[in-house]
Amino acid sequence: MISKLYLWLNLGSVLIPFIFTFHPRLRFDKKFKAFFPALMLSALLYLMWDVPFTMMGFWGFNADYLMEFRWFHLPIEEVLFFLCIPYACVFSHYTMVTVKPDQLLTMKTTRIINIILIVLLSILSVTCFDKAYTLVNALCTLIILLTTMMVRPQLLRKFYLTYLVLLIPFLMVDGILTGSLIDAPIVWYNDAENLGIRIFTIPIEDVFYGMGLILLNLLLTEVFLTLSKSPHQTPSYR
């Protein structure tokens, strides 16, 4: 059993993105003034329901993999998750956009995906009142998606493609967190509060959880980039 494994997963996830942040072609640091407020606000919004869910036993944490520090009943590693993972994912998104600027979905395909997601998330929102994680996760992701469609619809043309790539490392980290390849899960879930459908050890809801979390970070970053009105921070999409 690896002590402090949750911490090492967080730091390992963000290490390479941080090293390449200042690469001359990428210069993700030029977006910091917009990204860090977006990161902090997104983390706060997700922590607002992470704390009560932890207190009510909808999910919890294995102390064998954690440090002793706590913040509002959460291990400090859980707080760091909302900083390290979005940093890695948002950096990776902008890197893929920079390397493949013309790689985007057609508006027709994007609208079809939008409709499918809206229908699916709406169904989950009205049929899972007895499953707190499924319900709140579906509602949050739905609200974030609808807001993006209204405020930055072009963002989705690239996001759906990059998220497919991001799902690979995201699910690898999430798999370890939920017990893959280790003796016991770092994060355990009360299956009475979710659909009970798993991708190996990962609740199916986590796919939408990751989508909402990363999309919110990107949306807020794009909005703050526009507000900054700095020529070198012009948003990637209109």
Image (spheres, rainbow, N blue to C red):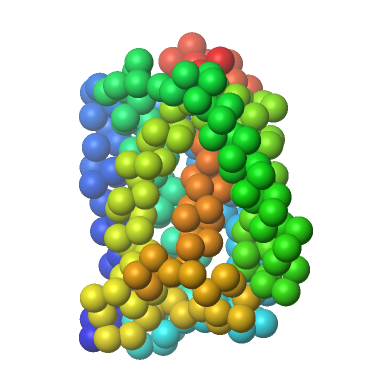
Residue shown at the point (30%, 60%) measured from the top left: 172
Residue 23 visible in the displayed image: yes
The answer to whether residue 68 is left or right of residue 60 is left
Instruction: Give the quarter of the image for residue 130.
Output: bottom right
Q: Dividing the image into 4 quarters, which one contains the C terminus?
A: top right
Of residues 61 and 138, the one nearer the viewer is: 138
Residue shown at the point (56%, 48%) measured from the top left: 212
125 in relation to 179, above or below? above
Residue shown at the point (35%, 15%) measured from the top left: 102
Residue 14 visible in the displayed image: no
Total count of labels? 0
166 in relation to 75, above or below? above
Query: How far from the left and from the top, in percent, is residue 48?
Result: 67, 63
170 in relation to 218, above or below? below
Residue shown at the point (48%, 11%) measured from the top left: 231
237 in relation to 162, above or below? above
